[in-house]
Amino acid sequence: QTLDSNSLVLGLLPDASFTTDHAKLETGDRLIIYTDGIVEAFNKREEEFGEARLRDVAVKEAHRPAASFQEELYKAVLAFWGPRQPVDDMTMMIVDVNR
């Protein structure tokens, strides 16, 4: 399941309003929270990494524990990006639901 957000950066404006969404998490679920710098990474052909590639890597690496799962996602984005310098932050948090 994907929860989309089109909100501003948290803390950027003091009076900003945000929308909320809900999802029921079950034991064994994994929550992947990331900034747009992950999916908006462009390679030298100006192709975007995108949600579909992120999803493909996440499915392929789902068997890994959270820390190595996150590392493999970063590696995939950086390999796609190539030798270029990042132009946006790439922040990601992985949460495994154990109870």
Image (tube, rainbow, N blue to C red):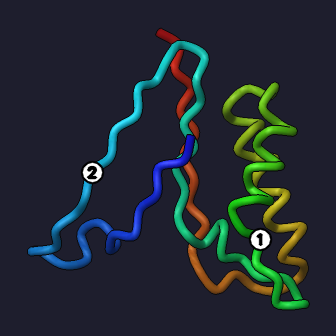
Q: Residue 82 is drawn in which quadrant?
A: bottom right
The front one of 75 and 51 is: 51
Q: Residue at x 25, y 58 (%)?
A: 19
Within the image, what quadrant is residue 42 found in?
Answer: bottom right
Q: Secondary structure at mark 2?
A: loop
Q: Is residue 97 left or right of residue 44?
A: left
Residue farthest along the top direction in this orientation: 99
Query: At which x and y percent is residue 35?
Result: 52, 64
Q: Residues within 10 Å of mark 1 (few under 14, many from 20)?
A: many
Number of residues whose C-alpha sits closer than 10 Å to that of mark 2, classed few (under 14), some (14–19) or many (20 or more): few
Question: Mark 1 is on which residue type?
Answer: Phe
Q: Are marks 1 and 2 in contact (CB under 8 Å)?
A: no
Q: Mark 1 or 2 closer to N-term?
A: 2
Give coordinates of residue 27: x percent, y percent: 53, 13
Q: Nearer the viewer, residue 83 or 3?
A: 3
Distance CA(mark 1)–CA(mark 2): 26 Å
Q: Is residue 30 above or below residue 99?
A: below
- Give residue 61's mark: none
Residue lying furthest front in this view? Answer: 1
The picture places residue 15, in percent across and down from the top left corner, at 9, 74
Q: Amino acid at mark 2?
A: Thr
Residue labelled with disc 2: 20
| Displayed quadrant of residue 84 | bottom right
- 38 and 47: which one is in front? 47
Per the image, the residue denoted by label 1 is: 49
In the rendered view, tell whether residue 46 sits above or below residue 8: below
**Residue at the location (84% across, 58% down)?**
76
Which quarter of the rendering shows the N terminus? top right
**Disc 1 vs disc 2: which is toward the camera?**
2
Q: Position of residue 51 (x, y in %)?
A: 69, 61
